[in-house]
Image (cartoon, rainbow, N blue to C red):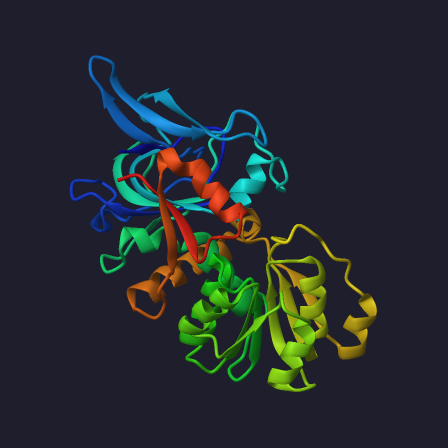
Amino acid sequence: MAVVARGPWLPRAWLCRWGLDSPLSPKRQPGFPRNPPLALCYRRAGPGCGRHYRAALCAELKQPLAIEEVASRPVRPHEVRVDVHFCGVNFADILVCHGQYQEKPQLPFIPGMEFSGTVLEIGTDVSIVKEMLWQIPERAPLREAAALPVSYGTAILALEHRARTRPGETVLVTAAAGATGLAVIDVATNVLQAQVFVIAATGSDKKCKLALQKGAQSTVNYSQGSLKEAVRKLVGSAGVNVAIDTVGGDVFLEALRSLAWEGRIVVVGFAGGNIASVPANLLLLKNISAMGLYWGRYKEQSFPVFSRTLSSALQYCQQGRIQPHIGAVFKLEEVNDAFLHVIQRKSTGKVLISLK
């Protein structure tokens, strides 16, 4: 199974190992050119017809993805062929396929934002690779590596770069049992040396239990009452210092009202489907800050920051400081089931597509 770096849709991050005979091995200073066109697919040898790929193709918005054969071609000068093992399924992938995301690729396209695999072949003009492929340490399994880019990249940027979380502060994270939520708990608890008191807010008791198992000190089931009042009972009237919100709507407003003096809330997404308006008077009265985080945009606007988050995630994983939670793994043929699993809020942690 392999992927050739090409196609109309641009995944944001790829984590790879270099083959023993690859000119991109660590001894040859691995790298990759900026903004390569890439698509997720894998190889299937066909008798008498050469090498073909099977791809999950979005040919029509809001319709199931189709698994189709794609003819192979030689790797072009600025391309790389990768043997893909796993690729991540993100809520943003579903939004893209419904035409509801910030980026709207031209139909047909192959969705996907992250994968892990092994470099097989490189183009003649690829000499310095450091901007789109990151080397996976030997101690980091390819399965776990595929769960790092979007979720942990977002968590690290939200906590360290945007919120500037300090030791001893309280952190509230919504949708805490999702891929990003668990990553926030993992980074806040383990990377920040357990000096951050984490409150995990989820929509079910089962997900609250998972958040506690993954390191949260307290949990709140916001489907059973006011998030603000529940947080008040845990930390008192002072409130929390940092809130990371991926839900939006009323949950965002409750989290905003739970902030302490000079607290910071980071808007990561709107998984609940509603975008709330920020009451500016609350920002003024408590001197609090509401800020956004669009992780993928850093690739174009501030690449050093983007790259640093991935390098940090890989380093933390190699050191054993973080442990990505893989909630479910589907085959490529089950990609629509994987999407439905996420849409129905059955998922916890990262959902992966396995190509092996």
**Residue 34 drawn above or below residue 43:** below
Residue 124 visible in the shown view: no
**Residue 216 drawn above or below residue 131:** below
Q: Quadrant of residue 326?
A: bottom left
Q: Is residue 177 left or right of residue 81?
A: right
Closer-to-camera residue (257/327): 327
- What residue is rendered at 55% in x and 52% in y? 298
Q: Position of residue 76 (x, y in %)?
A: 35, 26
Closer-to-camera residue (252/125): 252
Q: Is residue 289 left or right of residue 80?
A: right
**Residue 156 drawn above or below residue 132:** below
Query: Quarter of the image containing the C terminus?
Result: top left
Query: Quarter of the image containing the N terminus?
Result: top left
Q: Position of residue 109 (x, y in %)?
A: 50, 29
**Residue 195 drawn above or below residue 334:** below
Residue 135 visible in the shown view: yes
Q: Position of residue 2 (x, y in %)?
A: 29, 33
Residue at the outermost right position: 281
- What residue is rendered at 48% in x and 42% in y? 339
Q: Quadrant of residue 325?
A: bottom left
Q: Is residue 330 left or right of residue 12?
A: left
